[in-house]
Amino acid sequence: MSIVHSDVLEQFQQDNATPHASRVATKWLQEHFSEFGHFHWPPKSPEMNIIEDIRDALLHAVENRSPPPRTPMDLWTVLKDEWCEFPPRYLQTIVEFMPHRVAAHLCVGRATQY
């Protein structure tokens, strides 16, 4: 952290996702916790990244294709086709729902603070 951030306002954010909570990472954080601030991020908190919704929708569309794409170029074509098939309102709805996600995240954060 001191190499990346030279100021005293260093904050580390750990989102507690399984790949980010390995024994090695957890041990390192415990050993170095006093060297920087730690932003508490509740485990199993609501997803804040709308890209995940779009990725899931595209993944679902690709999985439902018959026949499935067989080459990287086929996959690229299917992804572009499916992207163009999204109704404009779909993306707008995801963006408009963000205040609700933020409110849900704040509620989870308050409930899990120690």
Image (cartoon, rainbow, N blue to C red):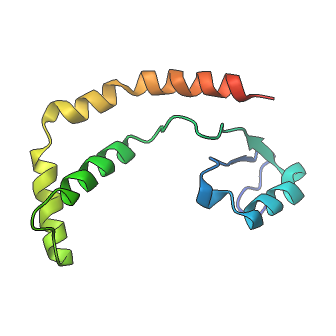
* Residue 83 against residue 69 in the figure, above or below: above
**54 or 38, which lies in front?**
54
* Residue 78 against residue 101 in the figure, above or below: below
Residue at point 10%, 46% (across, down): 85
Picture quadrant of residue 76: bottom left
**92 or 3, which lies in front?**
92
At which x and y percent is residue 86? 14, 42
* Residue 78 against residue 33 in the figure, above or below: below
Residue at point 10%, 49% (across, down): 84
* Residue 50 against residue 27 in the figure, above or below: above
**91 or 104, which lies in front?**
104
Picture quadrant of residue 29: bottom right
At which x and y percent is residue 34? 89, 50
Residue at point 18%, 69% (across, down): 75
**23 or 11, which lies in front?**
23
- Left or right, residue 61 beside residue 43: left
- Left or right, residue 6 beside residue 53: right
Q: How many marks?
A: 0
Picture quadrant of residue 27: bottom right
At which x and y percent is residue 33? 85, 51
Quadrant for the N terminus, please.
bottom right
At which x and y percent is residue 107? 60, 21
Residue at point 75%, 28% (across, down): 113
Q: Residue furthest bottom?
A: 71
Quadrant for the C terminus, please.
top right
